[in-house]
Image (cartoon, grey):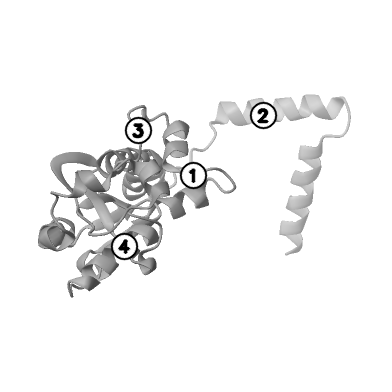
Amino acid sequence: MRQIFLDTETTGLYHAQGHRVIEVAAVEVVNRRLTKHHFHYYLNPDREIDQGAQEVHGISLEFLQDKPRFADIANELIAFIADAELIMHNAPFDVGFLNCEFGLIEQKPVESIVAKVTDTLKIAKEMRPGQRNSLDALCRHYGIDNSRRTLHGALLDAELLADVYMAMTRGQDSLMIELDKPNKKHHDIAAQNALPLQIKLASQTEVSAHHEYLATLAKSGGCLWNTLELQTTIEKLES
């Protein structure tokens, strides 16, 4: 399955208050490798940008004046993410904004377009409970270079998220391969167990040496072997 790592930047925190998407970016991963395919647009929101939001992403309204509107790029975005696993950090935030934008142009919601929605923030919280799990914190934890991330940017964040996800899930594929692959050691043991049991009888020389050793033990005290052997003989005679 194709995996699409997506991020958005917005005019504010809450789409329910009329805030809009001003940047959307997505990168494609196939077989755990980034391909050369990506999706990226800045968008004119037709509204003001909250000061706090602008301080986070550094995108001004003046910069967006000549950019397309979400409706202009919606079909291209749908084609890019269709039938893929859509992976986002704090997915409810991005999905909420995208669904709001799709709703304004009477398009179906994200969940109906993609095969699956995965939230890396949820995964990180389960793996690292009680720790900071922001994208920056995860980059530091997994040794991923995020020095270019002086401000939030959707395309860079999508690429970093792909790196973080690969680090978080490293080893899962090889584990599944090991589970599926027959274990050679167990196979060899099973094959040996299937062979008929071979019984090798002692030679007359070995039997004589054994009795001589028991006789030596008997001279120095009680010989348990002789006692057990006598008891067994008696039981056989009585049966």
Q: Amino acid at mark 2?
A: His
Residue that numbered label 4 is attached to: 97
Q: Residue at x 38, y 69 (%)?
A: 16
Q: Image height check: is 106 above or below 233?
A: below
Q: Report the disc number at residue 210.
A: 2
Could you tell me which secondary element the residue under label 2 belongs to?
helix
**Residues at marks 3 and 4, CA–CA distance in whole angstroms:** 23 Å
* The one of 237 and 4 positioned closer to us in this rendering: 4
Residue that numbered label 3 is attached to: 149
Question: Which image quadrant for residue 60?
Answer: top left
Q: Position of residue 160 (x, y in %)?
A: 32, 38
Q: Nearer the viewer, mark 1 or mark 3?
A: 3
Q: Position of residue 88 (x, y in %)?
A: 33, 52
Residue that numbered label 1 is attached to: 133
Q: Nearer the viewer, mark 2 or mark 3?
A: 3
Q: Residue at x 57, y 48 (%)?
A: 129
Question: Which image quadrant for residue 79?
Answer: bottom left
Q: How many residues crowd around disc 1 within 10 Å: few (fewer than 14), some, or many (20 or more)?
A: many
Could you tell me which secondary element the residue under label 1 belongs to?
loop
Q: Please report contact status of discs 2 and 3: CB closer than 8 Å, yes or no.
A: no
Q: Earlier in the sequence, mark 2 or mark 1?
A: 1
Q: Is residue 150 left or right of residue 137?
A: left
